[in-house]
Image (cartoon, rainbow, N blue to C red):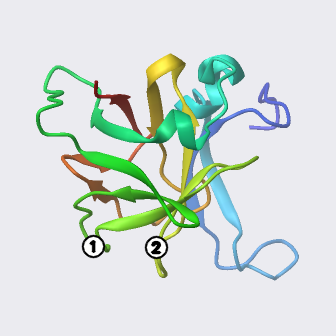
């Protein structure tokens, strides 16, 4: 294991066991590594240019959206983004959440969910797409359904209708 060819910032997949105690007798959070392999980064980290240089703005997001794929049907969009007084709001049937959530723009665009749910990061995908990603910090994330799409794994890309 000491000869692994990894550097700071690399993604790896580690298997192991939680130790009863470490060599310093602390034990809490100590992992006995059994195997370590290089891993592909999650989709949103693979290519910084994936967003196409497009900033998420209210004008970009307002409208109806459907999960990208062969079953995409704009006659039945997964959600709609609307400007309300003082806030940009995503309106949809969401499993385990109210049927609307605020959208926060700026340097870290995200879907602002009520506690105990964590916010979901959002990124542009080309001229007519937006990705809604799972929280980056929650290993025990319980997927959220937005319309017909479950936000899990690397997230879901939605395309604008109309």
Q: Is residue 103 left or right of residue 141?
A: right
- The residue lying at 28 percent from left, 49 percent from top is 150
Q: Which of 95/6 is in front?
A: 95
Q: For mark 1, does the 10 Å Cα neighbourhood hold few (<14), some (14 to 19), or many (20 or more) residues? A: few
Tell me, for residue 38, which label it has, or none.
none
Q: Are marks 2 and 1 in contact (CB under 8 Å)?
A: yes
List x then y, in percent, for residue 85.
Answer: 52, 66
Whether residue 84 is visible to the viewer of this picture, yes or no, is: yes
For the N terminus, the quadrant is top right
The image shows residue 128 at horizontal and vertical percentages of 44, 22
Question: Closest to the observer: 161 or 40?
Answer: 161
Q: Quadrant of the C terminus?
A: top left
The residue singled out by tag 2 in the image is 117
The residue under label 1 is 96
Q: Is residue 6 left or right of residue 143?
A: right
27 sits to left or right of 136: right
**Foreground residue, 112 or 8?**
112
Residue displayed at 65% across by 24% down: 54
**Secondary structure state at the residue bearing disc 1:** loop
Q: Which residue is drawn at 35% across and 28% down?
A: 160
x, y percentage for residue 117?
46, 73
């Amino acid at each position: 294991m000491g000869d692994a060819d990894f550097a700071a910032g690399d993604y790896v997949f580690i298997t192991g066991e939680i130790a009863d105690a470490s060599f310093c007798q602390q034990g809490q959070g100590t992992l006995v590594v059994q195997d370590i392999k290089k891993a592909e980064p999650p989709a949103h980290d693979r290519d910084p240019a994936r967003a196409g240089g497009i900033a998420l703005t209210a004008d970009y997001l307002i409208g109806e959206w459907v999960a990208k794929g062969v079953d995409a049907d704009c006659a039945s969009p997964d959600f709609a983004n609307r400007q309300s007084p003082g806030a940009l709001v995503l309106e949809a049937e969401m499993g385990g959440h109210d049927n609307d959530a605020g959208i926060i723009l700026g340097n870290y665009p995200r879907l602002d969910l009520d506690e105990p749910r964590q916010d979901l990061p959002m990124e542009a995908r080309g001229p007519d797409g937006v990705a809604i990603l799972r929280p980056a910090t929650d290993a025990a994330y319980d997927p959220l359904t937005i319309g017909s799409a479950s936000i899990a794994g690397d997230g879901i890309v939605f395309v604008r209708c109309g």
